[in-house]
Amino acid sequence: MHLLAEESVQIRCAVETAYEYACDLENFGRWFPGVIEIVAEDDLDLTTTGKSYLEAVSIPLRGSNKVRILVKEAQRSSIFITQGSLRPLLPRMEIRFNAIEPTGCRVNWRMYSQSKSVLVRVTLIPIARRIMRARAKGGMARLKLNLEAQSEA
């Protein structure tokens, strides 16, 4: 796997609150740049391996594209891993959550490419890194704002 981007943020809210909001991918477009729309394709709980979403994502110079997202692993208030069908990058997203006492948490977000292609590694991954790093920075800042505003309300 090739790391495309990583960003971490400390948030003044309970780790459970951060997990429920960030891992409900129907909220993803509210905090992560480039996500046009994302809808669940089934009624499974968000922590169920195999839960499926359909995401419309903005791709520079190509417009938008539909991507199927599958939950690969989910442990409440701890870790959330998805895998996307977007070829040729084959994205894998990981979000890790850690409680910080007494009323906060740290959220660490990572995006990887699972592509094994040398051509993809030399051509697309450098471009994807630049795009995803900028999106990750903005997305994690927006996640923090959204969750802290929700906690204060």
Image (tube, grey):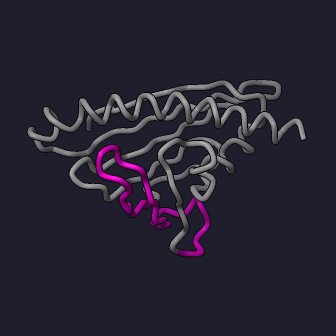
Q: Nearer the viewer, residue 93 or 30?
A: 30
Name which quarter of the figure residue 106 lies in: top right
Is residue 5 positioned above or below 72 on the image? above
Indicate the quadrant containing the N terminus: top left, top right, bottom left or bottom right.
top left
Is 68 included in the stretch rendered in magenta?
yes
Q: Is residue 119 left or right of residue 60?
A: left
Query: Residue 48 at what x, y percent from top left?
Result: 54, 63
The extreme right residue here reads 153
User: Is 145 located above or below residue 64 in the figure?
Assistant: above
Quarter containing the C terminus: top right
Q: Kindly identify the residue that appears in the image at 42 percent across and 29 percent down.
A: 133
Q: Eyeballing the image, is 140 above or below 86?
A: above
**Total marks in image:** 0
Q: Residue at x 57, y 50 (%)?
A: 28
Left or right of 82: which side holds 104?
Answer: right
Q: Name which quarter of the figure residue 134 lies in.
A: top left
Residue drawn at x 77%, y 37% as measured from the top left: 14
Q: Which residues are magenta?
A: 42-70
Rendering quarter of residue 107: top right
Residue, far left: 119
Position of residue 67 in the picture relative to residue 52 (left or right): left
Q: Residue 132 at x, y = what percent?
A: 40, 34
Q: Is residue 111 magenta?
A: no
Residue farthest to the bottom, as pictured = 42
Q: Is residue 125 left or right of residue 36?
A: left
**Residue drawn 29% across the image and 42% down it:** 113
Residue 117, position as x, y percentages in the image: 12, 44
